[in-house]
Amino acid sequence: PDNDTVRTDMLDYAFEIEHFDAHLGRMLAALDASGQLADTLVVVTADNGMPFPRVKGQEYEMSNHLPLAMMWPAGVAAPGRKIDDYVSFIDFAPTFLELAGVAWEAGGMQPAAGRSLSDIFKSDKSGVVDAKRDHVLIGKERHDVGRPHDQGYPVRGIVKQGKLYLENYEPARWPAGNPETGYLNTDGSPTKTVVLGGRTQTAAAKYWQWSFGKRPAEEFYDVAGDPLCLTNMAAQPARAAEMQALRAQMIAELQEQQDPRMFGRGAMFDEYPYADASGRGFYERYMGGEKLRAGWVSSTDFEKQPLD
């Protein structure tokens, strides 16, 4: 929603980014003063989209398309370039090992789909350096507690040439966590409070649905023309062939990577115990009356009754 509360919340987030940027400048200055900057590969990125509803912990453009700036005076052939190749976090480990002169298998690494970015460093091209880097795969299993039996919200997706395809394997589940346990997969914030408050209001209900409502089994978006991913084209006959081609590529690559979900073994992911033992069984314990701490959300985020 466009109102003063949301605008102020986003400005607070922008202030945090400015604070980080200032400290990054100080770190670079310290490296320069010590004579180490030229030989240091600096990687600046983020591990998730901004902590707002329908972004962090979700699968859309703003959730996964993150800033990435890399600096290495002694190793980047033509600095100052903007690269349009699709790259992913899985490319970092192959990059670091290659630059360190460590062979992948000799370093004890298991097979992985990532590719070293060294060819981009060595190139003098801007824009697209390697035409084969035209897509990335994305996915999620359990990102937080709050559903019955600590279940996740499994998704697989592919982003290619300005299009995003998502397959939601358990569409009957709540994507941001159950309402009665506070939508725990979305951090508490003034914006979240505003969106939750509009659930029963005709004009504002769409924001709740976009952020917290249940989703169809398939989603397909034109990211170039719809960066907020609000118009799902999955049911449009004119887009069916394009969508199915992306889905087929996604499945083929995931099968090659031995993703258990591609072979009917997806339930195994829900069987893994939640890493933080104190949070295990959150849904059953909370609904049973136990007072549990969920410090990343607000007390008002919890719906009084289940919504289904």
Image (cartoon, helix red, strand yellow):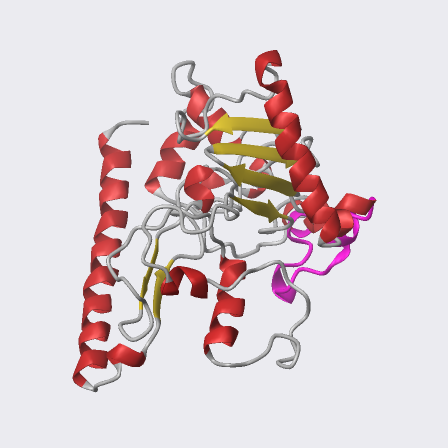
Magenta segment, which residues? Answer: 264-285
Q: Is residue 39 left or right of residue 158?
A: left
Q: Quadrant of residue 77?
A: bottom left
Is any atom of residue 270 visible in this view? no
Is any atom of residue 32 visible in this view? yes
Q: Quadrant of the N terminus?
A: top left
Q: Is residue 121 left or right of residue 211?
A: left
Q: Nearer the viewer, residue 48 or 296?
A: 48
In the image, residue 32 lies in the stretch drawn in magenta:
no
* Above or below 55: residue 241: above
Question: From this viewpoint, which residue is outermost toward the bottom?
Answer: 34
In the image, residue 273 lies in the stretch drawn in magenta:
yes
- Residue shown at 51% from the left, 61% from the top: 91
Q: Is residue 10 left or right of residue 193?
A: left
Q: Is residue 305 left or right of residue 169?
A: left
- Residue shown at 31% from the left, 80% from the top: 39
